[in-house]
Image (cartoon, rainbow, N blue to C red):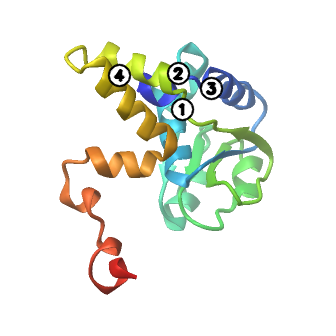
Amino acid sequence: LGFLLAGREDTRAALAHELAKAPQIITAIASSKSEALAFLCACLVNGGEDFESFRAKALVVTGSGVWGRLVDSDSPLVLIPMFDEPDVTTAIRRGHRVVVPVPHGVRPRGALVAVLPLDRQRAADALLADHPAISRDRAAKVAAHASRNLISFRRTIARSPQVKKPPWSQGAEGRR
């Protein structure tokens, strides 16, 4: 997880600062929605004591039905919607923080946290710290790939055939 936070200390601090404020909507913008979500999760799991009070309260929500039930919770949550058109107004009024991961090009709402690309050198160092058997040259190549496109990198290292070669990349659709 240190790999996903490499060189993003200022962005991590900005997210912690916004979460510490009163309930609000926070837009985390990155090169892709998946990268923004990966950054958010890495912060919550490995972001240090700034995120300690939010870690057990953060939920990634994939559907509006579940969203509605969670918004009704009396316990303040950090809700991360992964579907279109969540009712953020009600969630905030009920005391929840809402962090929306979006790709560049989507108009942000509320506080903005811009997720910068990975720092290649720091990402390589983090990779070497977690996997000392890997060579420095290999770590540098992996970090360079991840800093350019995290989704492509994820497919490259995937073991699952569905992730390595997603359905949209096959057949007539893939050829197009």
Residue beneath label 2, please? 47
Q: Secondary structure at mark 1?
A: loop
- Asked if marks 2 and 4 touch (Cβ < 8 Å), the reply is no
The reply, left or right, for residue 141 in relation to residue 9 is left
Image quarter (top left, top right, bottom left or bottom right) of the C terminus: bottom left
Of 54 and 153, the residue lying toward us: 153
Mark seen at residue 42: none
Neighbours of disc 4 within 10 Å: few (<14), some (14-19), many (20+): many
Q: CA distance from mark 1 to mark 2?
A: 15 Å
Q: CA distance from mark 2 to mark 3?
A: 7 Å
Q: Is residue 38 above or below residue 10?
A: below
- Asked if marks 3 and 1 touch (Cβ < 8 Å), the reply is no
- Asked if marks 2 and 3 touch (Cβ < 8 Å), the reply is yes
The residue positioned 60% from the left and 26% from the top of the image is 8
Residue beneath label 1, please? 118
Residue beneath label 3, please? 12
Residue 11: image location, x then y, percent: 66, 28
Q: CA distance from mark 2 to mark 4?
A: 17 Å
Which residue type carries mark 2? Gly
Mark seen at residue 127: 4
